[in-house]
Image (cartoon, rainbow, N blue to C red):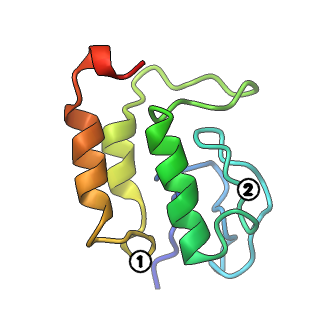
Amino acid sequence: MMIATFCRVCGYEPEEAPWGESGQQPTYQYCPCCNTQFGVTDAVFEQIQAERKAWIEAGMPWRSKRYAQPEDWNPLEQIGLIPYQFVNLKEEPELVRALASRPKDEES
């Protein structure tokens, strides 16, 4: 069984698996990218969707003040790493495409 090591909200892969080695026990750590607290704000599908929507609408910022944003970080590539069981395939691709294709001057 492959254990998802990516954030359920933004797709970031932290050093420690967000839900532990078993995939069943959250670490309660925070994702440095989207600031989701594993086991708290990513425990219910609807909450995952709401957290992701808020992060995307904010422009997909790197939120950690403690950990520097990786130099080669690309949130549009990263979001494709979200485990599929935590994505609403019917609704979210349109939202991601719309935000990704929006001209830079509309992002303010």
Distance between the Cα atoms at labels 2 and 1? 18 Å
Which residue is painted at 50% across and 69% down in the image? 4
Task: Report the residue marked by disc 1.
Answer: 85
Which residue is painted at 52% across and 30% down in the image? 61
Left/right placement of residue 100 relative to residue 88 reads left
Looking at the rendered structure, the number of numbered marks drawn on it comes to: 2
Give the image location of residue 106, x and y in percent: 31, 21
Residue type (three-letter) at the residue carrying disc 2: Gln
Left/right placement of residue 104 relative to residue 56 reads left
Q: Secondary structure at mark 2?
A: loop
In the image, residue 74 sits, relative to residue 5, either above or below, namely above
Residue type (three-letter) at the residue carrying disc 1: Gln
Q: Secondary structure at mark 1?
A: helix
User: How would you rate the neighbour count of disc 1 (Cα within 10 Å): few for under 14, some for 14-19, many for 20 or more?
Assistant: few
Which residue is painted at 80% across and 61% down in the image? 28
User: How would you rate the neighbour count of disc 2 (Cα within 10 Å): few for under 14, some for 14-19, many for 20 or more?
Assistant: some
Task: Report the residue marked by disc 2.
Answer: 37
